Every structure is written in structure tokens, then in C-alpha cells.
Amino acid sequence: MNIELPRSATAFDVPTKQLNRRQLVKAGAWAAPAVILAVATPPASASTPAPAPTPGIPDLVFTNLSAGAQTRYVPGHSLASPPWWVAGYAVLNRIDGNTSVGLSYFATDPTAAVTSITLTLTVSDATGLLGTKPTVTSGSGWVASSGALSGATATYVFSWAGSISAGQAGQPGYTSQLTFSLPSDDLSKPSALPWPKTIAAMAIATNAHAATTSASAGQP
């Protein structure tokens, strides 16, 4: 004989026939938040737009940057022997280049002017180059500030003083063209050096956005 013990009523003891349309709607309303909370929210950074340029501040721009390696020949014999170029060989003498920096306004009413610029040239594989001060061949207002060698990277710094302004929105004014020479050890054969030499340039000024560019100097 089976004996059923009495038990207390629970929320689960609602007869199926009593789940009318209104109760089903209520049950769905309670279940919905659990589904919403289970959905992952995309990170805020994924939809954050890049910051817009600062209104009223001009941009520095490079007109160009070009560079080329120069060599000199080392004679292998005296003048009394066969011509020196028969047994002579070339060594890297320097890397020459030129560039200029402009100031371009995109503000509706530009008023600022740039009176000084710092130009940094970085050679990433500088084997055959020296970490001494570079040479300014020409360029009004430009001076060579410093040179440094750290591992295989050489850094050369130039500075410019003067005054440039855009005149009107979007129309740049430019510095004079800087013609420079980067010093070499004057001993290394170009064929034994890594090429091309990649030169990265950055120009900065106190009241303008910085500019960057790069160029390659191939084997002479």
C-alpha cells in the first residue's frame, strides 16, 4: 500500500490549466532581463572616433625630403704605379639631403605664426655613419644642433629660426630649403654596408602640430 505524505504548497504547484494568457505574458516579462544581461556590450574604445584636429592650430608640413649617398675613392697605388683607379676602391664619404618645412592653416581665421622649428633626422641602420654634428650646406635660418649614435641608430638635430605664417587658410608658408650632409666614418666600403639607409624626419614647433616624413638613400 502506498502512503502519500502531505507537503506544503509551493510556487511550482500552480496547475497547468491555471497558466492563462496573462500569466504567460508576466512570465515572459520576468525572463526578458536575464536575456538582456547575458548579451556582451562592445568595448567603448571600439566605437570611439579618433580625436579631431584642434581648431585654430596650424599643421607643420614637409615640402619634400630627399637624400643620396656620396663616395670618395681611395687610391691603391702611388702615382708612379698604374693609375690609382685600377686598384682603388670607394668609401662612403657622406649622405647629402635637402628638405623644407611649411606651415599650413586650416582654421578660418589664422593668427599664429611659427618662429622656430626643431628638425630631427633618424637613421635606423647607421652603419658607416658617425654620431657627430651634421653640416648645413645651405638654408637661411637653419643651423646644425647635434649628432648622436646609439647602437645602430644615428640621430641628427637641426633648428630653424625665422617667421612663417600661412597668410590665408590652407595656404602654407615655408622655411628656406635646408641642404645638409650627414657625416660618415669615411672608411667603410659601400658594398659592405646595409642599404638603403632609411631616414625618418620629424619637425616640431611650440604652437603647431608636428609633421613626419621619411626618405631612403640607396647604395651609391
Image (cartoon, rainbow, N blue to C red):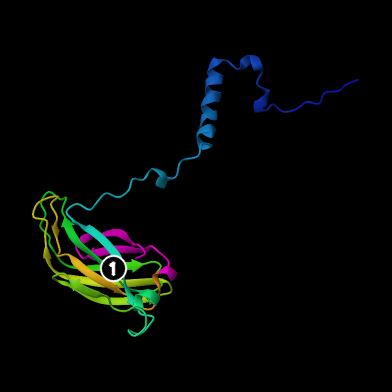
Q: Going 21% across and 68% down the picture, which residue do you hit?
A: 179
Residue topped by disc 1? 120
User: Viewer-proximal residue, 165 or 16?
Assistant: 165
Depicted 49 relative to depicted 74: above or below = above
The question of residue 213 being in magenta is answered with yes
Q: Nearer the viewer, residue 192 or 87?
A: 87
User: What residue sits 75% from the left and 27% below the top?
Assistant: 7
- Residue 107 lies within the magenta run: no
Specify start and end residues of the magenta stretch as a single range: 191-220
Q: Position of residue 58 (x, y in %)?
A: 18, 56
Main secondary structure found in the magenta portion: strand
Q: Residue at x 19, y 67 (%)?
A: 178
* Along the viewing direction, whichever of 75 and 195 lies nearer the viewer: 75
Query: Does residue 184 appear in the picture of this structure?
Result: no
Q: Position of residue 74 (x, y in %)?
A: 35, 78
Q: Is residue 73 visible?
A: yes
Number of other residues with Cα within 10 Å of mark 1, as a class: few under 14, some 14 to 19, many 20 or more: many
**Element under label 1?**
strand
Q: Residue furthest right?
A: 1
Amino acid type at image mark 1 = Thr
